[in-house]
Amino acid sequence: MAGEQEDQFNAFITRCTTDRDKSDRQRTGRLAGQYIAVKDNITTSGIMTTCGSAILNGYIPPYDAHVITKIVNEGAIIAGKTNMDEFGMGTTTENSAFGPTRNPVNPERVPGGSSGGSAAAVAAGLVPMALGTDTGGSIRCPASFCGIVGLKPTYSRVSRYGLIAYANSLEQIGPMARTVTGVSDLMQVIAGYDSRDATSTDHPYHHTPSADISGKRIGVPEEFFGTGVDAHVAETVRKAIDRLEAGGAEIVPCSMKSMAYALAAYYVICTSEASSNLARYDGVRYGVPVDTTPQWHDAFRAVRGERFGPEVQRRILLGTFALSAGYYGKYYAKAQIARQQVRADFDRLFQEVDLLAGPTMPTVAFRLGEMADPLSMYLADILTVPANLAGVPAISVPCGTVDGMPVGLQVMGRPFDDEGVVDAAYAYE
Ligand code: GLN
């Protein structure tokens, strides 16, 4: 690679100096000889997988995630495991037990998160492609902040087997690359049915990007340019949408009222699922074992108190509260209703338009340390979480800069029209 270049932005938690999958036979396949960086919440047999957490430091999985089997079978070489917000919880890659990743465009800024290491590795030129995961924007946000392309596939299109769960009903593994073609190439390899993921559907992706978007109807909900969206970012994205119009698309102003509840619903659902998923980390089963000679509950409390970072502890508490007997109806059940409304809004809009477009993030990359307040950090996810709540495909493609920092154009599509969002991004690129 890649292998010899210095990792000056702390993009990797683990770098693979030897090729685990080296065999005597010549590499063949669609990714032959390509180095791919892998987010550290995707299991890799024999290679440490930490989720950016001290609680999994030293954990070496005995098996490969489905996507790993796929890329290796196509001749790819695992370049290493990339830094991330602990368990995917964050928007900056500062919530990592392995220190923050820096943005290669400007190291005083964050790369976005939670797949910030994957984005930085691509943006810094250490690898041409990377795998990220997106629960509420974690592929698209860092793609936007680092000036690369990232796709969150339609829910169920890429197997989650071997993805260490944060919030199962929201998340997908997806491709990140410098170009739309790179993203599309990697998507070809990772998409398709897998019996080991109960939510997997049989929708392989065989597609070559086409820049022909003439006649496509692209909806632009006014809420995508609502409060909190930086005026310069908005202007840059509007110009990008004008270019899609010049390319033959029809631009349709519209409205998505459920945006008012999307963020709140997302944070109730993701913390609820996380509180359940993270119950398995007890210091005994994974990572460096703890001394269990004292009372088990004392050991359990100590290890979770010490090895989970503050944001993870906050979310476990929030999720446990939302799911507790007295409050379940008030929070979790309501969040599910709001989620249905978001889904219904997308369904309604997609009867009138083929795609939706707007900014990926309300601002450009923050400065390191700027997002110290968790609530302001959550607000930054407003434009990315709707696609996860509804399971629809969404891509971020670079569309200009503000203050020298990249801005991302986000395009969303109907479920299983990942091809359509790729084409719109390609037409823009
Ligand atoms: N920033 C969002 C969160 O913290 C999204 C994270 C993600 O997609 N993994 O939940």
Image: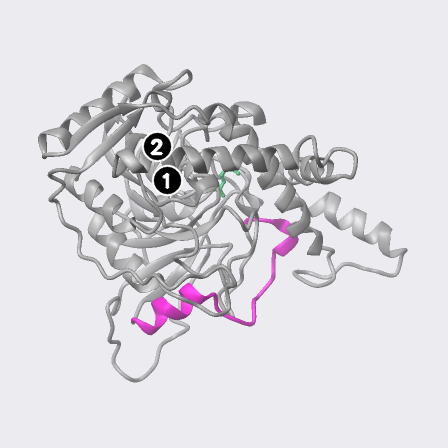
Q: Which residue is mark 1?
A: 140
> In the rendered structure, are the residues bearing label 2 and label 1 in contact, judged by CB atoms less than 8 Å apart?
yes
Across and down, in percent, residue 314 comes to 67, 35
Residue 85 position, x and y percent, is 52, 42
Asked if residue 62 lies in the magenta stretch, the reply is yes
**Residue 76 drawn at (x, y percent):** 31, 67
Q: Residue furthest right?
A: 295
**Secondary structure state at the residue bearing disc 2:** loop
Q: In this rendering, is residue 364 above or below 17?
A: above
| The N terminus - image quarter | bottom left
Residue 387 image offset from top left, x and y in percent: 41, 39
Q: Which residue lies at the image location 59% right of the left edge and 39% below the top edge?
A: 269
Write down the residue under mark 2.
Answer: 360
Asked if residue 237 is among those painted magenta in the image, a careful observer would answer no
- Say whether mark 2 is within 8 Å of ligand 1: no
The mark that comes first in sequence, 2 or 1, is 1
Residue at horizontal 48 percent and vertical 48 percent from the top: 171
Q: Residue at x 17, y 56 (%)?
A: 208
The CA distance from mark 2 to mark 1 is 7 Å
Q: Amino acid at mark 2?
A: Thr
Q: Residue at x 20, y 34 (%)?
A: 217
318 to the left or right of 123:
right
Amino acid under disc 1? Arg
Quadrant of the drawing holding the C terminus: top left
Label 1 crowd bin: few (<14), some (14–19), many (20+), radius 10 Å: many
Q: Which residues are magenta?
A: 52-74
Residue 108: image quadrant is: top left
Q: Is residue 398 left or right of residue 17?
A: left
Q: Is residue 323 above or below residue 118?
A: above
